Image (cartoon, grey):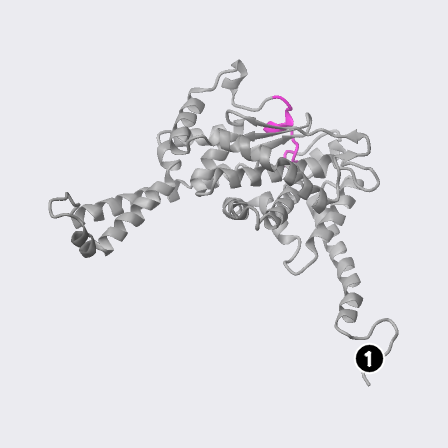
Amino acid sequence: MSEMAPASWGHASRHYAEGGVTGIPAKAAGAPSPMERRWAELLEKATPGVRDTVERTYKQWNGILRDYMRTETALRLTVGDEAQAVPVRVVAGMPRPFAQVIEQFDGLEWLLLNRARVEDAQRGSRFMLDNYGSLLGEVPDDAEVAEPEHLIAVENTAAELLKLLEKIDAVKRIIGIEEDVLGAYFFRVPEIRLYWMVIGIIASALDVSPEALTIVVLTHELAHAYTHLGRDIDNEQWDTGAFAGSDLDIVEGLAQFYTNVICQRLEPRMPGALRAYKALLEKQSGSYRAHLDWVGGEERGGEIVRVAMIECRSQRMTESAKFGQAIDRHRKQVKGREKPVKAQATGAPGNSGMSGSA
């Protein structure tokens, strides 16, 4: 494809389209920027060992998530003796778009990374106020106990800090970048990179576990890799130019659709993943919510989306409107096939034309 529209998923302006540049300019010299160092230190205090957690989670779940992805998409990175490698790396630093937004919260790092503690302080002070009489009856007479007005002050202070967090709405502003920044699929390499610092920061802000959020991010990026490079039953892949030139709604919508499906499948084994997916989705907008309009809960959504995706790939479809039309068309076809199956299952007339009644 000659010229790519700025709204295309793989436009050159997007950090993962470059194939080599992963961080803000300071990383070119191989050293973290002062901002990155500050965030890393504060993140380690707020969530000790978060880098190791992201690394351990990726290694534990990578193979499992790929199995799920193969099942749900019916696409393979390995066919016979031919294998398409898409390695995963856990990397330090921040992708450029994330760094440009997060620097706006200079001085508020401690608050963004400790929201859960502030909420605990608010709930804890209210709990002690509500049970102040019982509290006095249980502690020694010579114990130093806070006066009710002091507890009220703590509760009010926590409430004000939470209002400040809501006002700045850092997570929504970060997620509003409309670009994968917790992890990214570098399709020209190809390689998946997980940004452990970003995952740690967003996990703290959303009050979800880093493990669960790592699974969500890895699943999303694997969905990009499989929908792009996975081979269908005809041994075909998605042409890289068409993939990169496709509207964000198509590429991100597919990744979000399969992330949702797989997080639901993981519910018995890792219930936190679905919670993390939903907490992130609540803050997302635009292309990251495109999949919500594709299929309803009672429909055979996996089949509908999968067939539409294969059509999109084979016809080098790049416009989201046309993809939506493909979804609608295949929805009607699936519903048409369901009717005789439902009739036979309930004892209603089949194709014989008999009424079924005595």
Q: For this view, does 108 lie left or right of residue 135?
A: right
Q: Which residue is at a point 47% across and 19% down the rendered structure image?
A: 32
Whether residue 327 is visible, yes or no, is yes
Question: Can you say whether 320 is above or below 1 in the image?
Answer: below
Residue most extreme to the left: 142
Looking at the image, residue 97 lies above or below residue 211:
above
- The residue sitting at 81% across, 75% down in the picture is 349
Q: Nearer the viewer, residue 44 or 258?
A: 44
What secondary structure do most residues of the magenta stretch adopt?
loop
Looking at the image, the residue that sits furthest to the top is 29
Q: Would residue 59 be found to the left or right of residue 199 on screen?
A: right
Q: Quadrant of the C terminus?
A: bottom right
Spot the residue most to the right. Answer: 352
Closer-to-camera residue (112/24): 112
Image coords of residue 190 (percent x, y): 68, 27
Regarding mark 1 in the picture, which secondary structure is present there? loop
Quadrant assignment, res 336: bottom right
Along the line of sight, the residue nearer the viewer: 39 or 293:
39
**Against 10, is 332 above or below?**
below
Residue shown at the point (86%, 71%) measured from the top left: 351
Q: Is residue 98 visible?
A: no
Magenta residues, start to end: 6-20
Please state which amino acid type lies under the numbered disc 1: Gly
User: Which residue was labeled with disc 1?
Assistant: 356
Image coordinates for residue 308, horizontal then vertical, percent: 75, 48
Q: Is residue 15 magenta?
A: yes
The N terminus lies in which quarter of the figure? top right
Question: Does 343 appear in magenta?
Answer: no
* x then y, percent, for residue 338: 77, 63
Which of these two is toward me, 141 or 77? 141
Neighbours of disc 1 within 10 Å: few (<14), some (14-19), many (20+): few
